Amino acid sequence: MSASPVEQATPAVSVDWAGALVSVAAGLAAMLARLLTLERATLGFLLRSMFTAAVCSYFVGEGTRPLFGPNQQGLWLCTVGLAGFASPEVVTWLIGETPKALRWASRKVKGWLGEPRKRSKAKAKRSLRKPRR
């Protein structure tokens, strides 16, 4: 008699919504506290920065959760808050620097490939003459 096949249960991926909410709230709170001290805080700038902080805090929180043990929740929250705090600056820098980097890269590629050479008029006339014998 053969053994009955054992069904292996696939582990269900579950999202800890309470932890996700805490990580998003920590990033938003850190960003709001910093942005309220700025002079140029327009509504669009505030919303963009807070959205960026929330998204970055969520992904950093979910990505670093397994790295911290149950006794290190404070360190985990600090990591999430710092990531949310720094993310709008990184995004603003990328928005400002990407066009410059693309222009720099196009100049470098043109330099490597070389510009097509223009033949001087004298050289062009010499090439049209009949060769000497």
Image: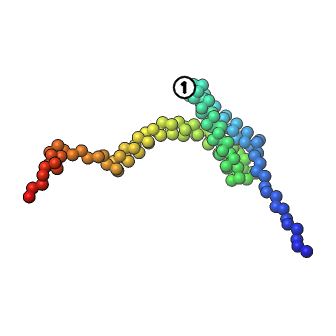
Above-or-below relation of 31 to 115: above
> Residue 103 at what x, y percent from top left?
41, 40
Residue in the image at 82% along x and 58% along y = 9
> Residue 122 at what x, y percent from top left?
14, 45
In which quadrant is the C terminus drawn?
A: bottom left
Name the colouring of the figure.
rainbow
Residue in the image at 79% along x and 57% along y = 10
- The one nearer the camera, 13 or 68, is 13
Mark 1 neighbour class, 10 Å CA radius: few under 14, some 14 to 19, many 20 or more: few
- The one nearer the camera, 11 or 96, is 11
In which quadrant is the N terminus drawn?
A: bottom right
Residue 87 in view of the camera: yes
> Residue 90 at what x, y percent from top left?
54, 40
Above-or-below relation of 33 to 11: above
Q: Quadrant of residue 39?
A: top right
Instruction: Specify whether 82 is left or right of 17.
Output: left
Give the residue number, with chain letter if any, for mark 1: 39
Above-or-below relation of 22 to 44: below
Residue 37 in view of the camera: no
> Residue 45 at what x, y percent from top left?
57, 29
Q: Tell me which amino acid carries mark 1.
A: Glu
Residue in the image at 62% along x and 42% along y = 83
Which residue in the rendered view is the most extreme toward the left? 133
Residue in the image at 44% along x and 42% along y = 101
Under tag 1, what secondary structure? loop
